[in-house]
Amino acid sequence: MLTISVRLFAQLREAKGEETVTINVSAGSTLREVYEQLFEGPLRALPIAFARNDTYAKPTDVVEDGDNVAFLPPVGGG
Amino acid sequence: MLGLTDGPIDVATVRNAVDDPGFGAILVFEGVARNNFDGRRVTHLSYEAYEELAVPVLQAIAKECFENFGAKCAIVHRTGPVPIEDPTVVIAVGTPHRPACYDASRYALEALKARLPVWKKEVYDDGHDWKRNQVPDE
């Protein structure tokens, strides 16, 4: 198992009640798989963007132990 | 000047950041907190941002404004609670001539709405919504 930190924003943060959660995931997990481990229902269906260690990443990127990942719901700036 | 602030945006400071003796045109766009949406009264807005990614995105948009339009660009987006009528984002662009200035201003705004990792909470008397920007290619 790996331990990673997950940063959440907007409705994802509200759903978990925390800005950052620390979770254990299986070795070889992709960002998309980690997201689906954390969220279900309507939140799982959102078009999410992913970041890994403060850089945009692909949903298929594999996480490593100690990673800081972030899930970005659809943006609303302006 | 490209960044976020959790207090009121000083519009004049953003505008002055694009001063250049070679510019014949400067445009300042203000996005402003509106008091209604779809018939519901909005009490205020609240923004949150992924700052570590937002600043590089603003830098990329400014670079594109220069490469595409020869424009100098300053952008400040507010975070946290924003009262009605306050600016939520200020975009200043300067160019030698006016056509490119209008184009660059619109480009910067649309790029920001599509890409900037910032989230808007619209707060009503009886609840709130996280607003998703409409992106042209969706």
Image (tube, coloured by chain):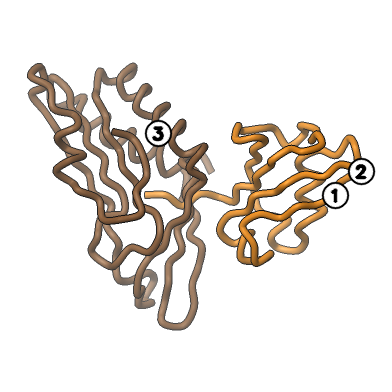
Residue B107 spot, x, y in % from top left: 33, 33
Chain identifier of the residue bearing label 2 in the image? A
Chain A shade? orange
> What kind of element bears circle 3?
helix
Q: Are marks 1 and 2 in contact (CB under 8 Å)?
A: yes
Q: Please state which amino acid type lies under the numbered disc 1.
A: Asn
Determine the residue positioned at 69% across, 40% down: A68
Which residue carries the number 3 mark?
Answer: B58
The circle on residue B98 is: none
Front in this rendered view, residue B36 or B4: B4
Determine the residue positioned at 43% across, 67% down: B122
Determine the residue positioned at 40% across, 40% down: B112
Which residue carries the number 2 mark?
Answer: A1
Q: Is A10 displayed left or right of A26 in the figure?
A: left
> Residue A5, relative to residue B53: is it above or below?
below
> What kind of element bears circle 2?
loop
Crowding around mark 2 (Cα neighbors within 10 Å: few <14, some 14 to 19, many 20+) is few
Occupied quadrant, residue B27: top left
Tell me the distance, in whole angstroms, between the alpha carbons under discs 3 and 1: 33 Å
